[in-house]
Amino acid sequence: MADVSDSENSNRTELDRSQPSSASASDDSKQQKEKDPVDIPPDYATGVRLLLIMFTIFVSTILVSLEIGIIATAIPGITNDFRKLDNVGWYGSATFILAASASPLWGKLFKYLDVKWVYLSAVGIFLVGSIVAAAAPTSVSVIIGRAIQGWGASGVLGGTLIVINYVAPPRNHPLLIGTWMAVFMVSTILGPVIGGAFTSGVTWRWCFWINLPVGGPIIVLLLLFLRIPKHIKKAPATWQEIILALDLPGFCLLLVSLVCLTLALQWGGQTKSWNDGSVIATLVMWIVLSIGFFITEWFQGHHAMAPFSILKLRMTWSNALFCLISYGALYQVMFYLPIYFQSIHGQSAVTSGVNTLPFLAFFALGAVISGGVIGKTRYTQPYELLGALIMTAGMALIYILDADSSKAMYIGAEVLFGFGVGMCNQIPMTAVQGFSKLEDVSSATGIMVMCQTLSGAYFVAIAQSVFANRMLQTVLSGEAHLDITLVLGTGASEIQDVFSGDDLKEVIAAYMVGIKDVFAFSLACAAFAVLLSLIIPLKRLPDHGKKDKPMTDEAVVEEKNKMDGTVEEENRDRS
């Protein structure tokens, strides 16, 4: 009997060893949850907590987006101080160039480092750029300050979208991103109004100084309210791995290629002929460096700024192209509609800003409506197509505007275009984020922000070249003997004061030719966006917020036994 009892006890002991107790299984489960962030249940912000976070990051968006457009009406004051007409294009393009180049880099930083402190760093860099531009003793200093602002702004804009994806429930993403887009657009277009008020009432330097008293409270709000959920974990990596992941060679190639393109477009047909050696050289360098950028990205693999593992997905590259082209139409209208009001209709910067309010209002309405509808249906492609069609119709009405167009005519065109572009422009970001794996969200967001800002770097520079070249050709072919330098150096809102009589008619006619060509280019972009929307996959957004129920202790033990049995069978097969 003793032998039997000992045998039973021995068997029980072996069984206990092979099948861990529920307590030990529970401990293993807890340790596994701590190690694997996927198993941590989502802890999304809701109610007042979500409202405070959204308010904080939206205010940050307002801060940086105002600076994108504020330079338009500050340029005349800057040129009066420094007398550097050949630097005019750089005051606006420097911001876009750095923002486009640095956006993917910020995406990597948000992936590997603490989101809160990276976001705060972006705000801090933007404020440093504001100080440099505000206190600038030379024209070059203003350009450097604007470039630093663009570097910080890309981190704030990309970081805002990443924070929305991390802290808000997935079902709320379309509406929140649509609201963010409305806030961004309203702030960007109000920028020239505020810039005009500062430039005419105080000094252009206050267009940059104003960021400091606004930026200080924003940093405090971020420290108090920005909290990232515990299920969001930064990717484990050493500092050496993080530096490699930043893809500095790709960043440098993209940055220098954009500089070459901007130089070529600002020289060609204005200060130098298109067949000038330096213009041809910079255009060739732009093409070579752009090809070099894509080759570098291919060899960099997962370390690339724009990883091909993400870009090769049809959902990503089709939405990225749609974003790039549709933003091209938007940026050109955003910058040249105020020029139309100020130059052709003789309106002040403030009045032209008031006349863009219908565009802003319906842009916001379209963005919020599409965000709400996508949140319910979880489809994106149909609303991109519908928005692109409405945007194209509105752009056609804007294109036919002329010097004698009535207020009802241009407001009607604004309403249609604003509603269409508001409906579709924020959807690519929603789609790419929604279909990305959690670990790829930051990189995918960086790619999409790069497309948004790259559109500004490309199409604003191209539009400026088209406008200036066509205007100059018209002036030179006219009967009036006008000073070309004076025409180029005079702000749109000042031509009514600088010129008079036949000279004024000639300048207005030249402005109208240049503006219509820019609007024709914008119309082509809108129509191309319609075609691009047809290749975007028709899929429902997944709800990453739905997680499987945690396994019970008994289920953990059972699953372990199944796995052990499978391993034993595989060993038998091998033997």
Image: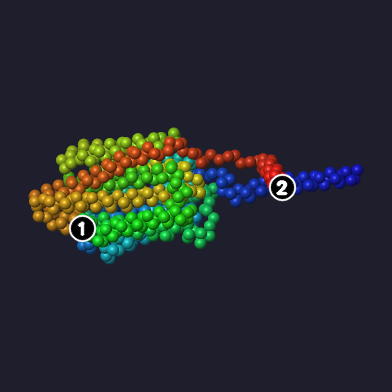
Q: Note whether 445 is above or below 209 in the view shown.
A: above
Position of 241 compared to 318: left or right?
right
The residue that mark 2 highlights is 575
Q: Looking at the image, is mark 1 or mark 2 nearer the viewer?
A: 2
- Residue at 41% across / 35% down in the picture? 373
Element assignment for label 2 = loop
* Cα gap from disc 1 to disc 2, whole angstroms: 79 Å
- Residue shown at 53% from the left, 39% from the top: 546
Left or right, residue 48 beside residue 383:
right
Q: Amino acid at mark 2?
A: Ser
In the displayed structure, does residue 514 sit left or right of residue 23? left
Residue flagged by tag 1: what amino acid is it? Ser
Earlier sequence position, callout 1 versus callout 2: 1
The image shows residue 553 at horizontal and vertical percentages of 67, 42
Q: Which residue is mark 1?
A: 273
**Screen quadrant of the N terminus:** top right
Q: Secondary structure at mark 1?
A: loop
Colouring method of the image: rainbow
Q: What number of labels is visible?
A: 2
